[in-house]
Image (cartoon, rainbow, N blue to C red):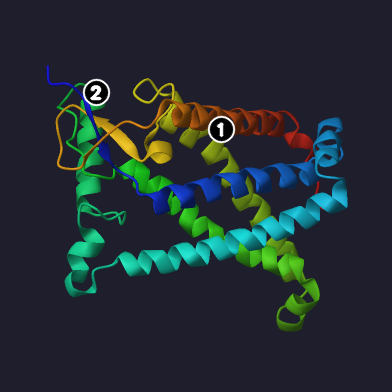
Amino acid sequence: MMPKSRIKRFGITDRLFHLFLMLTFIMQTATGFSRLFITTGWGKKLSYVFGGYETALIIHKWVGALMIVGFLVHTIYLLTRIKWGNFVKSIFGPDSLVPNLYDVKHLWQRTLWIFGLGAPPRLNRWTYWEKFDYWAVYWGLPLLAITGLMLMYPLMTCRMLPGWSLNIAMLLHKAEALLAISYIFIVHFFIGHLRPSSFPMNEGMFSGLKEEGKLEALEATPPATWYRVIYYVFGYAVLIFGIYLIINGIIYSRYITLH
C-alpha cells in the first residue's frame, strides 16, 4: 500500500475567506437568534451576551455590512482568477467551482454506487456537493444583503418602494437566514466534519492540505502540531456553538417573533 501524502488544496487567500465567513456567519446567527427568540428565556440570555436587544441589532447591522464588503472583495478576487484568454476552460475546467455536465455524471454514478449498481465516481478537484455548498452561500448573500439594507434604511426604501415591501423584505430575510443556518449547521457540518470519511475534522480548509493515497506534484509537508491544535479547538468551538444555536432554534421555533 502506497503511503499517504499531503497535497496543497487551498491557498492562504481561500482559507482567509473561509475564516472570515465562519466568524461573520456565526456572529450573525447568534445576534439574529437573540432577537428572533427574545420572548424566550434563552433568547434573553443570548441577547444579554451582546449587551441587550438593541445592541445586538447594532452588532448585527455592522457585521452584515462587513459581510457585504467581504462578498464584494471575494467577487473581485474571483474575476481576477479567470483566464480570459481561455475563458471556457477557465469557467468549466476541473479547477472551476462552476457546475458542469461532469457533476451530473458524478451524481448519477454516486447514486448507482449507493445502491450497489456501480463503482464510485472518480471526482475532480471539486465535488458536486462542494460546488453546491459554495453556490448556496454565494447566491444567498446578495438576498440577505439587499433585504438587510432595506430594513436598515426603511425611509429610503419607502421613497422608492411601497411600504409593504418592508414586510416582504423581513420575511425573505428571515426565511433565507433560517435556510442558510439550517443547511450550514446540519448538512455542511455533517459532510465537512462528522461523516466517517471526514471525522474528526476535514482539515483541508484550515491547513490548506488534503491527504492522498499517492504522491502528487503539489506535495506538501503536514502542518505543525501547535497549528493543528489551534484549528481543531477553534473549528470545534464554532461547530459546537453552531449546533447549540440550531438545537435551541428548533426547540424554541414556535416562539419566533416578527420584530
Apparent side of residue 211 relative to residue 48 in the rendered image (left or right): left
Name the residue that disc number 2 marks. 115
Instruction: State the residue at coordinates (15%, 27%).
Output: 119
Judge whether 58 appears above or below 191 on screen: below
Residue that lies at the very extreme toward the top in this rendered image: 1
Instruction: State the residue at coordinates (51%, 67%).
Output: 72
Say which amino acid is labelled 1.
Answer: Phe
Residue that lies at the very extreme toward the bottom in this rendered image: 159
Residue that lies at the very extreme toward the left in this rendered image: 1
User: How far from the left and from the top, in percent, is residue 124?
Assistant: 21, 44
Residue 144, visible in the rendered structure: no
User: How far from the left and from the top, in percent, is residue 18?
Assistant: 48, 47
User: How far from the left and from the top, in percent, is residue 102?
Assistant: 20, 48
User: How far from the left and from the top, in percent, is residue 213?
Assistant: 18, 26
Judge whether 190 appears above or below 83 on screen: above
As measured in the structure, the alpha-carbon distance from the residue carrying label 1 to the one carrying label 2 is 37 Å
How many marks overall?
2
Apparent side of residue 243 relative to residue 103 in the rendered image (left or right): right
Name the residue that disc number 1 marks. 234
Local crowd at mark 2 within 10 Å, few (<14), some, or many (≥20)? few
Say which amino acid is labelled 2.
Answer: Phe
In the rendered structure, are the residues bearing label 1 and label 2 in contact, judged by CB atoms less than 8 Å apart? Answer: no
| Residue nearest the viewer, comparing 60 with 249 | 60
Apparent side of residue 151 relative to residue 213 in the rendered image (left or right): right
| Residue nearest the viewer, comparing 70 with 209 | 209
Q: Quadrant of the N terminus?
A: top left
Local crowd at mark 1 within 10 Å, few (<14), some, or many (≥20)? few
Camera-near label (1 vs 2) is 1
Q: Which secondary structure, mark 1?
A: helix
Residue 61, visible in the rendered structure: yes
Instruction: State the residue at coordinates (21%, 27%).
Output: 113
